[in-house]
């Protein structure tokens, strides 16, 4: 989505054509290297994302220039699309996409925000909850505008298979399921930094993401000022024609 917006909205804002921009995504995910080559992720022969570096590669690159990241000064992101919310930050942890979506779903149904932590029981490692690898999936039931909903979260492909099987054989029924392919979500992604001590850090990284979210002023996706501006300036409304064209993809057309 970001790649697509950079080649369109951002390009226009600086008076460039999409082909004059080279966009690089730094991701915890090796699969994104293949994803950016998919024909439906291009427009008129110009790729949305030209190159993907994993976080592991990015760290190696920084080190290869002799840069000590701990001694560099923090700066703000470049505008136009510099704003981010806590809801976006937690996308990197298993359950985070679900939690961010529920925060906004609550707002869309009730017209007011919930407590930002109202759905934290779905988190891995939340109080009394399971940790990565302990149970095939986690579930949460709650009421939304008088309707009882039950949602579930699974990470790793083995657990994805188990929950799909349980849904198919009718032993469970959910209104919304989040699946992340890597154990612990992107925090445990295949492109993440390996420190050489064989310790799995997905859980620890996930907790850091939730701590970052907790400390942020903006914690709701629907309040991200940059996204609101994007819709106001150019994309109209969510699920509108332009947003559908630039922010959605057709997974059935993916031939992997
Ligand atoms: S969960 Fe794994 S495969 Fe899925 S986007 Fe994150 S890093 Fe990539």
Image: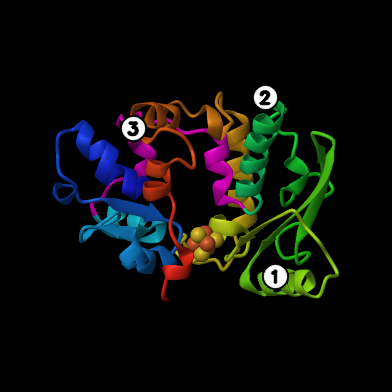
Of the image marks 2 and 3, the number of the one nearer the N terminus: 2
Q: Residues within 10 Å of mark 2 (few under 14, many from 20)?
A: few
- 244 or 6, nearer to the observer: 244
- Report which residue position mark 2 lands on: 111
In the drawing, does residue 171 fall left or right of residue 95? right
Which image quadrant for residue 43? bottom left
Contact? badges 3 and 1 (CB < 8 Å) = no
Q: Name the secondary structure under disc 2.
A: loop
Q: Name the secondary structure under disc 1.
A: helix
Q: Residues within 10 Å of mark 1 (few under 14, many from 20)?
A: many
Alpha-carbon distance for marks 2 and 3?
24 Å
Kindly identify the residue that appears in the image at 37 percent across and 46 percent down. Answer: 2
Kindly identify the residue that appears in the image at 53 percent across and 40 percent down. Answer: 88
Evaluate whether residue 130 shows in this view: no
Tell us which disc is closer to us: 2 or 1.
2
- Report which residue position mark 3 lands on: 234
Give residue 201's position: percent from left, percent from top. Answer: 59, 58
Kindly identify which numbered label has been placed on residue 159: 1
Q: Which residues are magenta?
A: 65-93
Give residue 56's position: percent from left, percent from top. Answer: 40, 60
Alpha-carbon distance for marks 3 and 1?
40 Å
Of the image marks 2 and 1, the number of the one nearer the N terminus: 2
Alpha-carbon distance for marks 2 and 1?
35 Å
């Amino acid at each position: 989505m970001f790649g697509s917006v950079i080649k369109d909205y951002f390009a226009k804002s600086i008076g460039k054509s999409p082909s004059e921009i080279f966009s690089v995504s730094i991701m915890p995910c090796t699969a994104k290297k293949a994803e950016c080559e998919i024909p439906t992720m291009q427009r008129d022969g110009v790729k949305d994302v030209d190159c993907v570096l994993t976080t592991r590669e990015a760290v190696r690159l920084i080190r290869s220039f002799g840069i000590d990241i701990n001694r560099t000064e923090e700066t703000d992101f470049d505008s136009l699309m510099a704003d981010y919310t806590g809801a976006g930050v937690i996308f990197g942890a298993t359950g985070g996409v679900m939690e961010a979506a529920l925060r906004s779903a609550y707002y869309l149904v009730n017209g007011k925000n919930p407590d930002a932590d109202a759905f934290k029981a779905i988190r891995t490692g939340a109080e009394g909850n399971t940790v990565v690898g302990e149970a095939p999936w986690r579930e949460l039931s709650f009421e939304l505008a008088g309707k009882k909903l039950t949602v579930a979260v699974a990470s790793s492909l083995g657990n994805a298979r188990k929950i799909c099987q349980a849904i198919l054989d009718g032993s469970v029924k959910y209104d919304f399921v989040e699946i992340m392919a890597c154990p612990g979500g992107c925090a445990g992604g295949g492109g993440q930094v390996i420190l050489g001590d064989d310790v799995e850090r997905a859980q620890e990284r996930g907790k850091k993401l939730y701590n970052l979210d907790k400390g942020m002023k903006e914690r709701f996706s629907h309040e991200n000022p940059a996204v609101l501006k994007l819709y106001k300036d150019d994309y109209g409304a969510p699920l509108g024609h332009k947003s559908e064209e630039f922010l959605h993809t057709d997974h059935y057309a993916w031939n992997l």
